[in-house]
Amino acid sequence: MRSSAWKKAESVAELGNLMADWLEGRLGGWTPGYLDTRPDEETNHLIPVLAPACRAGFVTTNSQPGHPPERGYDGRMWRQRAWVEGWIADAALLGRIRSSAKRQGIQVIAHGAGAKSRDYTVITEADGECCTSAGDYLGHRKMIADEWPGVGRRAVQELRRSTHLTLIDPVWGRDDRLWSALAGAIR
């Protein structure tokens, strides 16, 4: 069940506060962005960074921790890169996040209104085959329609003027640099 709070949101900042509340378990039910009723279990240790990032103005919509190679449920060898994506309307915050991420060697991909890109980075592999990728971008209207159904009209208008930001740790399995870079930028 969707919360009416999402429909009432009038800005990216309000979406960020709602997303932080959802990540921390204070807002139940289905959420836009992550498109689920609760964060994945693997995300739990990231919530102390993701929720403050959302409150600061980087509204995360998807993320995963880095995992070194390990045998998965299906017998294949899985590995992941740490990754997060979301929306940001505050240019100063965007600049701080970019600078902090680049100092830590994190790949930064920013798409403004009107941008499109078919370039992508593999972020999850099983036996060397791509299972998940990030960084490709079909444009604001498509992303907003896919990620933010049921959100207030004014918030959608602000999203259309915002930047879609993706941060990827290029090192497979590393799970500390991206999150420390993000935490440092929002202090």
Image (cartoon, rainbow, N blue to C red):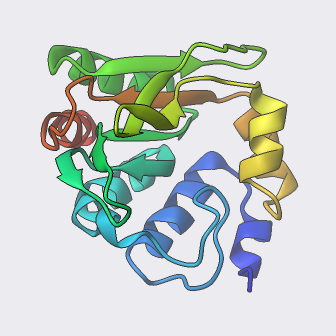
The answer to which of 111 and 64 lies nearer the viewer is: 64
Question: Where residue 128 appears, x then y in whole percent?
Answer: 36, 31
* Quarter where residue 161 is shown: top right
Quadrant in which the C terminus appears: top left
Q: Quadrant of the N terminus?
A: bottom right
Does residue 95 appear anywhere in the picture? no
Q: Residue at x 47, y 44 (%)?
A: 57
Percent x, y of residue 117: 67, 13
As drawn, 123 above or below 154: above
Q: Is residue 117 above or below residue 64?
A: above
The residue that appears at 82% across and 40% down in the rendered structure is 157
- Judged from this view, the residue extending furthest toward the front is 75
Q: Position of residue 140 (x, y in %)?
A: 76, 30
In the image, taking residue 57 as reference, residue 168 lies left or right, namely left
Task: Give the x, y percent position of residue 115.
Answer: 72, 13
In this view, 120 is above or below 64: above
Q: Toward which corner of the image does residue 96 lie, by quadrant? A: top left
Judge whether residue 156 can be spotted in this image: yes
Is 66 situated left or right of 31 in this image?
left
Report how many numbered discs are placed on residues in the image.
Answer: 0
Residue visible at 12% across and 42% down? 176
Q: Does 143 sit above or below residue 108?
A: below
Left or right, 177 with respect to 108, comes to left
Give whichever of 95, 72 is nearer the camera. 72
Picture residue at 33% right of the left edge, 63% below the top: 43
